[in-house]
Image (spheres, rainbow, N blue to C red):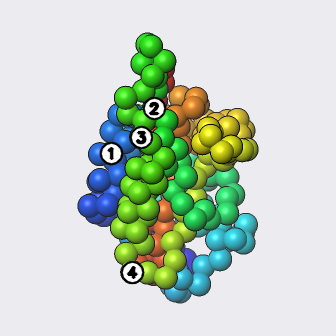
Amino acid sequence: MHLTFIEEDPDDTLLELASIIGFVEVEIAQYYVESDGHLENYDFTNIEEYRHFFTDFAEYANPIWSSRTRVEWDFNKVPFRYSSDTIMGFYRILRTGGAYSGDGTNANALEKTEASAIEARLRAGFQQNANSLQIFCVVEFTHMNAGDSFLVDMDSYEQLGDISLFFNKIAWDDLIFIINPEYGTLYVIAYTDSD
């Protein structure tokens, strides 16, 4: 399947997400994905098709993101992920609130119930009334215990660093792709922070 990416103005949902996590450095973009077949039939669980999607995206987006952020990007290096049911990276940044203040606290961190409600509302905004939504976060979690602490697979941060030097490669970084196949929309969210 041939894919063409056309950047669009961010919709209200993407702008709201960026505003909510404005306490970290965040870059967003929204694209319309043209294809010579139905994107709803695209198999993102197939590694070859997944790689093909990001290779085509990289060809278009690498120079744009490099110019916009003044650091190099290589979206060819986005690692294979299975789609998630939630925008876990977004939820995690809501719960942790980004970098800590000098006293070890964080005024931006939200309680579990509030963070879950915001994530669910924005996810519904990205999905609209489509049947499915594909969510890929580069950062993976090795374990989340009942206390809602987050243990991150440190290889994820190395993979972020391979994609771009935009990322500080510490606890508050992620690169998220949200695809609404029915509407042909791709949302890209990259954020980073440092103590």
Q: Which residue is mark 1?
A: 20
Q: Which residue is mark 4?
A: 129
Q: Residues within 10 Å of mark 2 (few under 14, many from 20)?
A: many
Label 2 vs 4, first from the N-terminus: 2
Amino acid carrying label 2: it is Gly
- Judge from the rendering whether residue 70 lies leftward or rightward of residue 136; answer left or right: left
Amino acid carrying label 4: it is Asn
Relative to 78, is 149 above or below?
Answer: above
Relative to 195, is 58 above or below?
Answer: below
Q: For residue 98, which numbered disc appears in the image? A: 2
**Alpha-carbon distance for marks 2 and 4?**
32 Å
Label 4 vs 1, first from the N-terminus: 1
**Alpha-carbon distance for marks 1 and 2?**
12 Å
Tag 2 and tag 4, C-beta contact below 8 Å:
no
Q: For residue 85, which numbered disc appears in the image? A: none
Tag 4 and tag 1, C-beta contact below 8 Å:
no
Amino acid carrying label 1: it is Ile
Residue 81 image offset from top left, x and y in percent: 67, 58
Label 3 vs 1, first from the N-terminus: 1
**Alpha-carbon distance for marks 3 and 1?**
11 Å
Q: Which residue is mark 3?
A: 110
Tag 3 and tag 1, C-beta contact below 8 Å:
no
Relative to 177, is 161 above or below?
Answer: above
